[in-house]
Image (cartoon, helix red, strand yellow):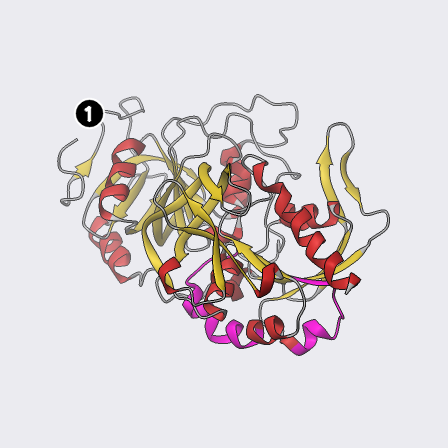
């Protein structure tokens, strides 16, 4: 596979090519000049983004509707994507009116016919309806190795059923994409208006439920919130009011919440922090319990005096081991982030509570005696393991302690 990353073109005949001898109808063009050829799926056209890889073997629909992927082209390392079809229950974006977030997807094998009783549509048609461009049949292992070695590249994904491409123009488009560093994306995926959430988790035979009697009132700042995060808050007896990312601290506190939740989301936390950090600092000073995840974790880290950095290839998957220093236990987590809190930048009074066992990067922190805490991973497990569900109970415990005082 020599030549990857040096401006070469990977075509049929390349080891790992997964289609028959037929005209290719899609391209993935990287800013370094590497061109991957394959078969187009989903929407037609072209779109630039940052190319990452995801190692999860289940939950591709949840991944493709996670707002944290805004601005990115996802390479699935698991070869069989689309085999259980799609449905309307497994969407994770909480704002259907906003852009889906993800730019495109890259898969190895052709999509098979759905084989699951919950399926209501073929992945190809679902991608097309959501405007997501895809490419199948290329060597995803070669692409993943490139990303691991050189970092997440900018690229353009293109699909034309006629198989005709202006590759020079696509390369120019890839090189013109500014990249996610310095890019503010939360505004593009946040809710337009505040709303109440009371839906609880899905259960076999019953589907989703509703909170019977709420014990706590939580305001969730939506930087790109996933639905299952909100459901797990509801599972804990929380009445959740979801508010836009740009909501002021004064408006949040006017709701008199028992706790404040900072949701996941896409983009550079330094850019989102331009408008969010002043409000988050006021919320910290309010004395209310606070819980953040993913982008919310990074914003809390910055608000508490730390810094964030861009990672080489990020963490994207459902098999990431994280150690919780507060319990001494190791949990397997679901992650999706290309930025991280720099643990070495955390000031006195801010404690690192979780750490990735893959690369030692920060995965959690707490301050103010544990009243304010956050984690980098997605503890709601959609998709992914459920090892981190205890964090929602921990948040409720903090609220109960605050109410008791």
Taking 360 as reference, is 349 left or right?
right
User: Is 86 located above or below residue 5 in the figure?
Assistant: above
Residue at (75%, 57%) from the top-left corner? 400
Tell me, yes or no, if residue 335 can be seen here.
yes
Residue at (47%, 60%) from the top-left corner? 298
Which one is in front, 361 or 249?
Answer: 361
Which one is in front, 70 or 231?
Answer: 231
Taking 202 as reference, is 25 left or right?
left
Tell me, yes or no, if residue 101 can be seen here.
no
Dot 1, how many residues are within 10 Å of its Cα: few (below 14), some (14-19), or many (20+)? few
Q: Is residue 275 magenta?
A: yes
Residue at (57%, 21%) from the top-left corner? 115
Query: How many numbered tags mark residues here?
Result: 1
Give percent across and percent down for residue 294.
50, 54
SS state under label 1? loop
Give percent across and percent down for residue 156.
31, 50
Give percent across and percent down for residue 263.
58, 57
User: Is 44 located above or below residue 288 in the figure?
Assistant: above
Which residue is the site of mark 1?
A: 13
Q: Is residue 159 magenta?
A: no
Taking 166 as reference, is 211 left or right?
right
**Which residues lie in the magenta part?**
250-279
Where residue 405 sits, quadrant-wise, is bottom right
Give percent across and percent down for residue 120.
63, 31
Instruction: Please state, as top left, top right, bottom left or bottom right, where the N terminus lies in the image.
Output: top left
């Amino acid at each position: 596979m020599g030549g990857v990353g040096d401006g070469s073109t990977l075509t049929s005949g390349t080891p790992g090519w997964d289609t028959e001898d037929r005209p290719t109808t899609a391209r993935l063009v990287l800013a370094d000049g590497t061109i991957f050829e394959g078969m187009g799926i989903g929407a037609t056209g072209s779109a630039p983004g940052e190319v990452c890889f995801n190692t999860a073997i289940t939950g591709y629909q949840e991944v493709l509707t996670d707002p944290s992927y805004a601005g990115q082209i996802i390479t699935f390392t698991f070869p069989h994507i689309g085999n259980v079809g799609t449905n309307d229950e497994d969407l994770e974006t909480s704002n259907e009116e906003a852009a889906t977030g993800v730019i495109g997807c890259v898969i190895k094998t052709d999509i098979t016919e759905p084989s699951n009783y919950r399926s209501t549509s073929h992945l190809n048609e679902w991608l097309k309806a959501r405007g997501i461009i895809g490419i199948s049949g290329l060597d995803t292992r070669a692409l993943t190795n490139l990303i691991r070695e050189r970092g997440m590249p900018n690229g353009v994904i293109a699909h034309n059923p006629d198989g005709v491409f202006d590759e020079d123009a696509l390369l120019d488009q890839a090189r013109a994409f500014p990249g996610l560093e310095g890019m503010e994306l939360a505004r593009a995926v946040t809710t337009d208006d505040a709303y109440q959430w009371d839906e609880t988790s899905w259960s076999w035979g019953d589907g989703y439920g509703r909170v019977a009697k709420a014990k706590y009132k939580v305001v969730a700042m939506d930087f790109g919130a996933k639905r299952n995060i909100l459901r797990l808050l509801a599972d804990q007896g929380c009445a959740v009011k979801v508010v836009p990312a740009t909501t002021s601290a004064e408006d949040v506190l006017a709701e008199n919440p028992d706790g404040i939740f900072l949701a996941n989301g896409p983009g550079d936390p330094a850019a989102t922090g331009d408008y969010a950090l002043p409000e988050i600092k006021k919320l910290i000073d309010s004395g209310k319990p606070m819980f953040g995840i993913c982008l919310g974790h990074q914003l809390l880290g910055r608000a508490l005096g730390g810094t964030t950095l861009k990672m080489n290839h990020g963490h994207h998957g459902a098999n990431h081991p994280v150690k919780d220093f507060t319990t001494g236990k190791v949990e397997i987590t679901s992650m999706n982030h290309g930025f991280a809190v720099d643990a070495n930048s955390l000031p006195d009074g801010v404690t690192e509570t979780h750490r990735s066992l893959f690369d030692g990067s920060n995965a959690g922190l707490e301050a103010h005696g544990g009243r304010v805490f956050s984690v980098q991973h997605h503890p709601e497990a959609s998709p992914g393991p459920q090892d981190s569900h205890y964090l929602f109970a921990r948040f409720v415990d903090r609220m109960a302690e605050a109410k008791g005082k």
